[in-house]
Image (cartoon, rainbow, N blue to C red):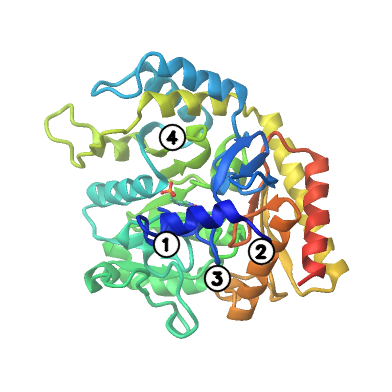
Amino acid sequence: MSEAPRSKALYDRATRVLPGGNTRTTVFVAPHPLYARAGHGCRVTDVDGVTRLDFVNNYTSLIHGHGHPTVTAAIADQLTRGTCFAMPTEAEVALAELICDRLPTAERIRFTNSGTEAVMMAVKAARAYTGRPKIAKVEGAYHGSYDFVEASMAPSPENWGEPDPTPVPYAKGTPQGVLDDVVVIPLNDPAAAERILAPHADELAAILIDPLPFRAGLIPAQAAFLEFVRAFARNHGTLLIFDEVISFRLGYHGAQGVFGVEPDLTTLGKIIGGGLPVGAVAGRADVMAVFDPSGGKAALPHGGTFNANPLTMAAGRAAMEALPPEAIDRLNALGAQARAALGEAFAAAGVPGQVSGMGSLFRVHFHARPLTGYRAAYAHPEERARLQAFYWGLAERGVLISSDGLGAISTPMGTSEVQALAEAALGALRSL
Ligand code: PMP
C-alpha cells in the first residue's frame, strides 16, 4: 500500500483499545485498514484525504451510496421526533407494509438490528414451529455469527470432509452439541444433498439457503438445486429459509422473485435499512405466528431494545421507495458491464482469474477453476495473496472493493464509474 499516515496513526491508537484496531473482522486488512472520514454518493474519502470510488458500499448495504438526499431527509425528519421508544411506531408499520408488498412470500415480518439476528430468529422460528432441533446449510455459506449457521462457513481442504461435507467449527471453542445439530450440503448438487439430508429428514427444522452465497463463491444457485431443496423441505415438514440479506437487491421481488422459488421464511438486512443497522425475518403468517404474544406467551419471544427503531425504519423506507424496478434493472445492467469489463481486464493482463456474481454484485477470483461451489472457489494461499495485492493495487488507483473480492454497484454510479473500475483493475493486475 502507499503511504496513509493518518490511517496508520489511527490504527496504532486503535489497537490500544480495540483488539485488531476496530470492531469488525471483515474490515481488517493487513497491514492496517484505511480509516474513513466521509462518504458522498459513490465516493469515500479516507482520513488522509484520499477520495476513492466505493464499490464496497458497506458490504452491499448502501444501494444508493452515501448520503442519498431523500434517505438523509427521512433520517433528519425522524431525528427531530426521537430516535427510539419502548412503543411501536407508524414508521415500523409503513416499512413492514412496503416490504410485504414487494416480497411475494412475506405475509408477516419482524425487524431486527442485523442480518445475524434475522437469521438467528428465522432459525429459532423454524425450530419453534416444527419442534425440531436441526438445520441444514450450504458449505461455505455465510449467514452471520449465530453459532449454528457458522458451522462450515470457512472450512479448509484439511478439514472439510471427503466426499461429503462434515460440519466444521468456525470459531474456536464451538460446542460439539452445536455441530451435531447442523447438516452441511454442497451447493448445486441435488443428488449429494439428498443423500446427506435424508437420514436427518425427521429432525430438520429448516434448510437455510442463500441463492447467491458470496463466501461460497458468489455462484448463483441452480434451478435444479433450488427445486430439490424446496420439494425436500415440503415433503418432510421442514421449512425452507431464504437468506436474502445480500441477494434481496437482485430483483424488485427479491432473489426469490428472480429464482422463482417460494421459501417459507426469508431473512433480510443491508439495503432495507437505508444505511442504518437492520435485519428482518419475514414469511408465512402461520409460521410467523410463533412471534405473536397476543394470546399469552409467544412460542418464540423476540425482544430487542432497538428492534424497529424509527430512525432505521424511516431510512429504510426512503431507500426502498427510491428503488423502483427500473432502478434495479439499471443496477443489474451495470453489474453485468462490470463483470464483463473485469473479465476482460484479467484476459488483457494475462493474469489467471475470473469474475462471478449476478445482478449488481461481482466477486473476483484469482484462479480459473470452474466455479461449481465452495470447494472450487476456495482461495488457496497464493491466490489470497494476489487478491490482497489486487485490493491495494485498486486502492492506489482510486477504487475500493472489499478485501475479500466483493463489489456492488450503487445507484449514483454509471458507465463511467464502471469504466474507471475496469481501468484501475487493468493497472492493478498488470502490476501484480
Ligand atoms: N446473511 C448474509 C447472506 C450476509 O451476507 C450477512 C452479512 N454480510 C449476514 C447474514 C449477517 O448480516 P449482518 O452483518 O447485518 O449481521
Q: Amino acid at mark 3?
A: Tyr
Label 4 sits on residue: 106
Task: State the residue in front, 431 or 84.
Answer: 431
Mark 2 vs mark 4, foreground winner is: 2
Q: Amino acid at mark 2?
A: Met
Rendered location of residue 69, percent (x, y): 61, 22
Which tag, 1 or 4, sits closer to the chain's start? Answer: 1
Q: Amino acid at mark 1?
A: Gly
- The part of the image, by quadrant, that contains residue 106 is top left
Q: Are marks 2 and 1 in contact (CB under 8 Å)?
A: no
Q: Separation of disc 3 and disc 4 at Cα?
A: 29 Å
On the rendered structure, is 308 left or right of 255?
Answer: left
Rendered location of residue 238, percent (x, y): 34, 55
Residue positioned 26% across, 72% down in the render: 173
Label 2 sits on residue: 1
Which tag, 2 or 3, sits closer to the chain's start? Answer: 2
Dot 4 lies on which element? loop
Q: Which numbered dot is residue 374?
A: 3
